[in-house]
Image (cartoon, rainbow, N blue to C red):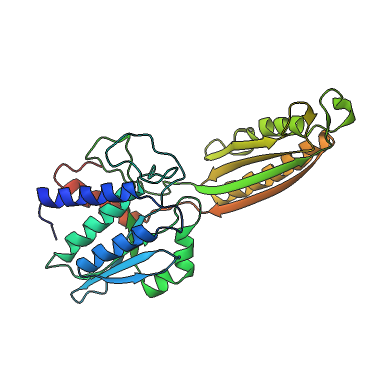
């Protein structure tokens, strides 16, 4: 089954969709305007539309022919809490929010695919177009699944495309295996005894203990994980004190971990906990650790990877 080349009018329409969505970004689980736009377009194309999974998720279903084969095409809809300073004509209208990760483009690509598929006379099977809320840190996919996504809309495989501006235009890259790591987050509160900055001997310095801990946490990947495996521990926040001349009684550290293999993830969690408590104790402080292994690694199905590679290679100008 092959599609015809896209007309200039079709491309212009898709670009217009993208600019409109870019101007009106919405944060996780607040994608109501975006969801309305998506649902309206899908209904125009003749798809059956279901709303409400994961709060603001949208699913459009297209069925043709007699085949029982069913696939999903997924896009994420949420934006980020970032102020846009691009100066483009279609810049975000919402202060402090923008589509910095390109989810507006993902939505438009999936909508364009839905419109194209709705016109294919020889489509034989079912396609569920899945528009997910809250991809940025908030677990929108999990919420949709918990609400019955794959019970209501079973799929043999799910396909998605993520923009990657560093690649040359017209290039598509597919990866056999796990292309995106699992994610963990942690918050460590180091509690000591506050004192005047001129008399540090009278307290237990939570900031000093936190600084030593930060240095130690950066050794976890290099000294506890086999170099043949991938792991990352990054400190992204440190908060402590609110005046010039007082050593605070507590200091908090926040950060993130990444891994692929389960045993590596277990080691990261164990060492973050061990180092936090032992180093804090060495400075006369205590450490409270809240560690969350939040999302598993993204693992591609080998057969689906081969199919995508073949389709892209056979397309005009396709590169893999």
Q: Is residue 137 above or below residue 209?
A: below
Left or right? Give the position of 78 relative to 319.
right
Q: How many marks?
A: 0
Which residue is at 66% across, 45% downward?
Answer: 187
Compare residues 148 and 23 and report the one nearer the observer: 23
Q: Residue 252's x, y, as percent?
A: 69, 40
Residue 31: x and y, percent? Answer: 40, 58
Residue 72 appears anywhere in the view: no
Between 190 and 295, the one lying in front of the other is 190
In the image, 49 versus 117, the foreground residue is: 49
Residue that protrudes farthest toward the bottom in the picture:
66
The percent coordinates of residue 216 (x first, y second) are 68, 32
Q: Residue at x 50, y 54 (%)?
A: 138
Query: From the viewer's perspective, is 268 left or right of 72?
Result: right
Q: Residue furthest top?
A: 198
Q: Quadrant of the N terminus?
A: bottom left
Q: Is residue 266 left or right of residue 48?
A: right
User: In the picture, residue 206 is in which quadrant?
Assistant: top right
């Amino acid at each position: 089954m092959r599609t015809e080349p896209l007309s200039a009018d079709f491309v212009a329409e898709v670009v217009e969709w993208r600019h409109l969505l870019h101007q009106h970004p919405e944060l996780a689980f607040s994608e109501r305007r975006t969801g309305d736009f998506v649902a309206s377009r899908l209904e125009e194309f003749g798809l059956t539309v279901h709303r409400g999974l994961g709060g603001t998720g949208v699913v459009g279903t297209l069925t043709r022919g007699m085949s029982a084969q069913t696939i999903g095409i997924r896009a994420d809809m949420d934006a980020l809490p970032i102020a846009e300073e691009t100066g483009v004509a279609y810049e975000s209208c919402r202060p402090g929010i923008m589509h910095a990760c390109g989810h507006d483009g993902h939505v438009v690509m999936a909508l364009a695919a839905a419109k194209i598929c709705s016109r294919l006379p020889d489509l034989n099977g079912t396609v569920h177009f899945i528009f997910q809320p809250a991809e940025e840190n908030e677990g929108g996919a999990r919420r949709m699944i918990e609400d019955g996504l794959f019970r209501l809309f079973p799929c043999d495989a799910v396909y998605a495309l993520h923009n990657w501006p560093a690649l040359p235009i017209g290039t598509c890259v597919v990866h056999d295996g796990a292309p995106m790591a699992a994610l963990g987050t942690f918050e460590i509160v180091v509690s000591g005894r506050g004192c005047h900055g001129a008399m540090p001997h009278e307290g237990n310095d939570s900031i000093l203990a936190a600084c030593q801990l930060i240095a130690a946490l950066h050794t976890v990947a290099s000294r506890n994980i086999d170099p043949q495996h991938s792991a990352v521990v990054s400190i992204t926040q440190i908060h402590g004190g609110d005046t010039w001349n007082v050593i605070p009684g507590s200091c908090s550290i926040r950060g993130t971990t990444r891994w692929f293999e389960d045993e590596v993830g277990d080691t990261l969690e164990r060492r973050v906990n061990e180092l936090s408590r032992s180093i804090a104790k060495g400075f006369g402080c205590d450490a409270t650790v809240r560690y969350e292994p939040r999302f598993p690694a993204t693992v591609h199905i080998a057969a689906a990877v081969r199919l995508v590679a073949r389709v892209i290679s056979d397309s005009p100008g396709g590169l893999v």
